[in-house]
């Protein structure tokens, strides 16, 4: 642990020497709101399971990378998703209820690189520049090569972003979002994929991935989990001892499993609605027979036990069939809708947010309507009289926010 502590100290000092900023200034001006953690997490977008006997066919396994960032107050910036592909497809946004401020970047392998890292940094700057409360923003990150590139570091220096790199092989202890959120995210994402598998959807496309990831993200990246991550990593409040204590390995005596005696004693005779209640009902019947009859109750026990087994079996079958029926109905409706949906290529590569994709689709719809009106009017349709969508940035027609050339005042200039 002394090596980890020394490594953090050396790295922190090197950053401040490079920027020529006093350490005391960082402590005073880099407040809770301006301390961010940025981990990356790669996931497999297939429906593969360890116990599954059927082998995954070639092409049914892809990688995706989720870049998520949050601060010590439990606030996050919109996720940045890197998926395997070359073009943006319209159904990624229309069939998944994709949030307007989330971003997607297709790459050849679904992994991040130096170019993607810089694009994410600009995404980070865009969503944190107006919320900052001090001059500097501290970015806690791991040692991925994209964080060490010259363009990445130059952009940080030019925009008052201080990078604090964690020591190698220590992110499971020192990276806040790894400590508090990503474990929950993985479990929640696995549960979402299990739901697809139960519905016999064994080929997970990007549409299913976006749906499952969005649900898992909303369940895992809560304010409580975010704050717990920074606290567990010993950053906010600053507590190095919390990390040192985790290095002490101690053997714990296993706790014996609790019995169901209390549950049995509290059971009141009633019609059972599930297998557990059926067992409790039979136990209660046996106890009453033993107390109130002096003759041997063995024949009655056998009869009751047979009834219980039959009831339990039927209850299991009804529960499973009802759940499967509901799940298959929902899956059939969703798949039917997705098969009918058109897959339109929106852009070849690059980063695209949900709002930008919506603007492109809206503009395409306007253009298609103009073409239909021209055909109906024999080519005499006046384009200027057609209703066009206004740009969401400047409010003018003739273009959208993606192609807007009107200058926007940089909020950083207002701070100077």
Image (spheres, grey):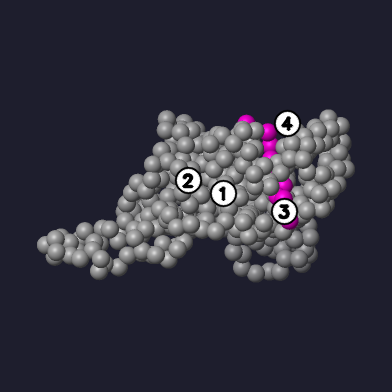
First of labels 1, 4 by sequence position: 1
Query: Horizontal and vertical percent for residue 321?
Result: 48, 55
Circle 4 sits on which residue? Answer: 168
Residue 400 visible in the shown view:
yes
Q: Nearer the viewer, mark 2 or mark 3?
A: 3
Query: Horizontal and vertical percent for residue 236?
Result: 80, 51
Circle 3 sits on which residue? Answer: 135
Q: What's the CA distance linking mark 2 and mark 3? A: 28 Å
Residue that appears at 82% across and 53% down: 28
First of labels 2, 3 by sequence position: 3
Circle 1 sits on which residue? Answer: 123
Q: What's the CA distance linking mark 1 and mark 4? A: 26 Å
Circle 2 sits on which residue? Answer: 351
> The residue tagged with tag 4: helix, strand or loop?
loop
Q: Nearer the viewer, mark 1 or mark 4?
A: 1
Q: Which mark is residue 165?
A: none
Query: Horizontal and vertical percent for residue 148?
Result: 65, 33
| Region in magenta | 134-145
Q: What's the CA distance linking mark 2 and mark 4? A: 29 Å
Foreground of the two, 291 or 112: 112
> The residue tagged with tag 3: helix, strand or loop?
loop
């Amino acid at each position: 642990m002394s090596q980890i502590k020394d490594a953090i100290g050396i790295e922190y000092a090197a950053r401040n020497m490079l920027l020529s900023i006093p350490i005391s200034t960082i402590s005073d001006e880099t407040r809770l709101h301006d301390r961010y953690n940025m981990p990356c997490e790669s996931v497999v977008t297939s429906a593969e399971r360890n116990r599954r006997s059927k082998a995954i066919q070639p092409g049914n396994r892809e990688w995706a990378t989720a870049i998520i960032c949050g601060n010590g107050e439990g606030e996050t910036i919109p996720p940045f998703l890197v998926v395997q592909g070359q073009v943006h497809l319209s159904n990624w946004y229309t069939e998944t209820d994709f949030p307007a401020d989330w971003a997607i970047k297709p790459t050849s392998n679904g992994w991040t690189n130096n170019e993607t890292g810089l694009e994410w940094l600009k995404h980070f700057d865009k969503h944190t520049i107006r919320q900052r409360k001090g001059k500097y923003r501290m970015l806690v990150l791991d040692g991925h090569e994209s964080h060490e590139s010259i363009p990445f570091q130059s952009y940080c220096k030019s925009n008052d972003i201080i990078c604090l790199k964690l020591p190698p092989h220590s992110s499971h202890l020192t990276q806040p979002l790894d400590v508090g959120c990503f474990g929950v995210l993985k479990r929640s994402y696995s549960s979402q994929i299990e739901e697809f598998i139960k519905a016999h959807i064994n080929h997970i496309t990007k549409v299913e991935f976006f749906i499952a990831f969005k649900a898992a993200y909303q369940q895992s990246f809560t304010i409580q989990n975010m704050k717990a991550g920074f606290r567990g990593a010993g950053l906010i409040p600053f507590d190095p001892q919390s990390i040192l204590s985790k290095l002490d390995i101690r053997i714990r005596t296993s706790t014996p499993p609790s019995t169901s005696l209390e549950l049995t004693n509290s059971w009141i005779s009633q019609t059972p609605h599930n297998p557990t209640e059926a067992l409790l009902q039979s136990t209660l019947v046996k106890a009453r027979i033993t107390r109130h009859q002096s003759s041997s109750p063995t024949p009655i026990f056998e009869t009751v036990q047979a009834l219980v087994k039959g009831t339990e079996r039927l209850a299991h079958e009804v529960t499973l069939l009802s759940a499967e029926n509901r799940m298959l109905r929902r899956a059939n409706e969703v798949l039917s809708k997705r098969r009918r949906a058109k897959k339109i290529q929106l852009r070849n590569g690059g980063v695209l947010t949900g709002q930008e994709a919506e603007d492109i689709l809206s503009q395409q719809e306007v253009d298609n309507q103009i073409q239909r009106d021209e055909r109906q009017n024999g080519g005499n349709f006046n384009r200027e009289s057609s209703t066009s969508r206004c740009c969401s940035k400047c409010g003018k027609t003739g273009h959208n926010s993606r192609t807007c050339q009107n200058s926007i005042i940089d909020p950083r200039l207002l701070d100077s």
